[in-house]
Image: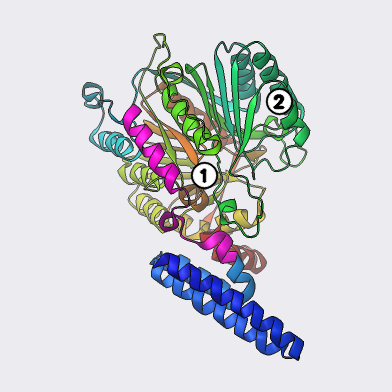
Amino acid sequence: MKNQLNILVFLASLLAVLYMTRIYWEGWVVGALSVAFSLSVVFIAVVIFFENRHPTKTLTWLLVLAAFPLVGFFFYLLFGQNHRKNRSFSLKAIQDEQAFHKIEGQKQINEDQIKKMGGHQQLLFRLAHRLGNNPVSFSTETKVLTDGKETFAHILQALKQADHHIHLEYYIVRDDEIGHELKEILIAKAKAGVEVRFLYDAVGSWQLSKAYIHELREGGVEITGFSPVKLPFLNHKINFRNHRKIIVIDGIIGFVGGLNIGDEYLGRHSYFGYWRDTHLFVRGEAVRTLQLIFLQDWHYQTGETILNPTYLSPALTSVHADGGVQMIASGPDTRWEINKKLFFSMITSAKKTIWIASPYFIPDDDILSALKIAALSGIDVRILVPNRPDKRIVFHASRSYFPELLEAGVKIYEYNQGFLHSKLIIVDHEIASIGTSNMDMRSFHLNFEVNAYLYRTKSVTKLVSDFVYDLEHSNQLSYQLFRNRSIFYRIIESTSRLLSPLL
């Protein structure tokens, strides 16, 4: 039914264009436009109706179509189609699920370790295992890296020590000072016989120069862009981006978190200033999941299958692990909106505290209700966001949610020491998620993401202390003061919020 409706939409659009052209030459432009507008609105509305999506999204799209019929038609083709029914990445979804089930899903849960945890934590363990086909590891060491300076110092040093292979996967890569330093190390390692594979998002890194890519290839690095878009205004895949940041070295050491590759992440941008971000160093068993995520993404883009023991069964040395670690991938190629469901589970299972840091805070109805109910129940809910925008529509849309959250008792803080880009959720000072997923609809529904879930590790304690420190360098919003902001900002925020289901 869905394919038939899409065909009808295309034919209706084509007929409308032909009819409009014919009428134009006859001098009846107004009539042609009217027919084209009407056909596009009617047929898109029918498609949306049969998709049975959330009423909020349905109404938003109908509003866009009513206000801008012809433009709305092409905008829908680009951004609006229901990817989970369209299954644009259906083959990747099948291959990834099979690979994860075969390699990770058959591992048994460590029941002895899990029984030491609380009941609500056990539920989260099992949910993450079922959704991500990956059990919790109690043989993994982690270390929190609190900004770009600390993160890149660790990354560059680890890269220089690589012996067999280096795998990198990034959303944004820039040809600047840190990008140049990374390039020189990768080329040197490739010439020394180390296998180097580099996967970058073709849209996120659209400014990356051809010369940069050419130098890496000439130096022996295998590099390719993820899901390139040749006709950006006619290809809906532009909306499904690889937002992951992964490094795997020799299958033993890994990195994951919020930092891309660029000088601004080191605080070298005059507008942003200090870039407050959080990354995670990983050593041990859980690195294999990061490796598998990379290898499946690499296979999707290149067709190369390298799921062999060389990459997936390295000789791991004994590590000092003090808790559990799970690496979970989510995206439009998964059956469920995995990170959204795990975040929801974390929020609803909280007993004392829910602390969230996110540069882009656009919750859907489920997350929004869960946060308000938690605050109204007496749980300490704190949300840390930037006090300056890098994406203005998203920034103002985020602020449109603040009044109802503040009224429910949620404490909201704006970071004022630079730009906050950390992506964290910490519950009861025992469980935490750190990775690439923002607390927004794009990360929940559209982007390829990866997060590390930590259970009673020293890294959780570090995240808590860092969060407290960040609050000391933030301004807490007052409900009374915020509700008295000017009508000008209210209009901007309300208008931006109308677009939130599309962001």
Residue displayed at 56% across by 64% down: 77
Q: Secondary structure at mark 2?
A: helix
User: Which label sits on residue 216?
Assistant: 2
Q: Which amino acid is tagged 1?
A: Asn
Of 494 and 44, which appears nearest the observer? Answer: 44
Position of the N terminus, as image quadrant, is bottom left
> Residue 37, located in which quarter of the rendered image?
bottom right
Q: Position of residue 95 (x, y in %)?
A: 40, 38
Separation of disc 1 and disc 2 at Cα? 31 Å
Residue displayed at 50% across by 34% down: 299
Name the residue that disc number 1 marks. 438
Of 90 and 41, which appears nearest the observer? Answer: 90
Location of residue 471 with respect to 236 vertically, above or below = above
For the record, the magenta segment spans: 75-103
Q: Position of residue 71 (x, y in %)?
A: 64, 71
Q: Residues within 10 Å of mark 1 (few under 14, many from 20)?
A: many
Q: Which amino acid is tagged 2?
A: Leu
Whichever of labels 1 and 2 marks the residue nearer the N terminus, that label is 2
Residue displayed at 41% across by 43% down: 93
> Residue 122, located in which quarter of the rendered image?
top left
